[in-house]
Amino acid sequence: MDNTEDNKVPTQAPEVEAPTALMNTDGAFAPGWFTRFEELKPYAATLSKFHRPEALAKSYANLEKLRGYPDTADAARMAAFREAVGLPAKAEEFAMERPQDTPDELWNEELVKQLSGVAYEYGVPPKALAALAERYTAEGRRFMERCRMENEEAVAQADAELQQCWGPAYENNLRTIETFLRTMGERTGVDVQKLVEHPALRANPDFARLMLEAAGLMDEAPLHTGGKPDNKQEAYRIAHDPTHPLHEAYMRTSHPQHRYANEQYDRLAFGR
């Protein structure tokens, strides 16, 4: 049996022929009027909604009003602008997302909230805001890494300068400073560890020199919390209290301040 009719390949539906005139006699657009213009075909769905020239003209006039950036003080126009370009209508729906792997040091929730509010107020597209956040955090990470490397270099230079200045006494001087700061931290309730690890102080050799001098002054005139100094108690601390600035020097004969520590002990313990 010949199934020629059933096996026929469907043909594409013929295109609607463009009307011979743009308008009907009643002043309305002829159906499919826009098909006469090749460049208007991509906008067929929108143009088919306009049946009269005055409706199209009115729409175009409204569009002209939206051209250019609206004044943020004009709430109505800004609302129309947001709607026209597809922005969130409410500030609560507009938020800057935290880019992946953003360090905590670079992300401030309160600041982000403020920036998101400004972006909403001025009609910044969310994608543009996200791109700015990505760029900002990338630059921030590079800046933090650069600062870390510069701090490490500065600390190394400070250590080299102190080693050259103090020579063989370098290690002992550092221990003296550490003991002094620990004692002062206990007396004042200051977290000395955070202080000595601060990059600005670790990279400053003058700070170490000042602390070493301060430790020496404390040795010469021990600090007391009040009342008459107890020499024997101070001498006892020199000999038995590891936190005393002179304890290590007193106990170690190789310490550069050992002789001085012995003299201070004898003076306090025996009145010599």
Image (cartoon, rainbow, N blue to C red):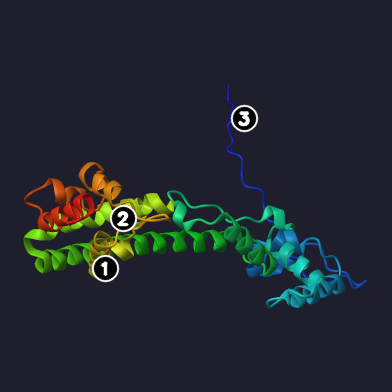
The residue under the point 10% across, 53% down is 255
Position of residue 138 in the picture relative to residue 215 (left or right): right
Tag 2 secondary structure? helix
For the residue carrying disc 3, how many other residues have a C-alpha within 10 Å: few (<14), some (14-19), or many (20+)? few
Q: Amino acid at mark 3?
A: Asp
Q: Which mark is residue 6?
A: 3
| Closer to us: 63 or 87 | 87
Q: Which mark is residue 263?
A: none
The residue under the point 6% across, 51% down is 254
For the residue carrying disc 2, how many other residues have a C-alpha within 10 Å: few (<14), some (14-19), or many (20+)? many
Q: Position of residue 270 (x, y in %)?
A: 19, 51
Q: Nearer the viewer, mark 3 or mark 2?
A: 2
> Split into 4 quadrants, where in the image is the N terminus?
top right
Tag 1 secondary structure? helix
| Closer to us: 13 or 35 | 35
- Which residue does the numbered mark 1 point to in the structure image? 210
Q: Amino acid at mark 1?
A: Leu
Q: Which is more N-terminal, label 1 or label 2?
A: 2
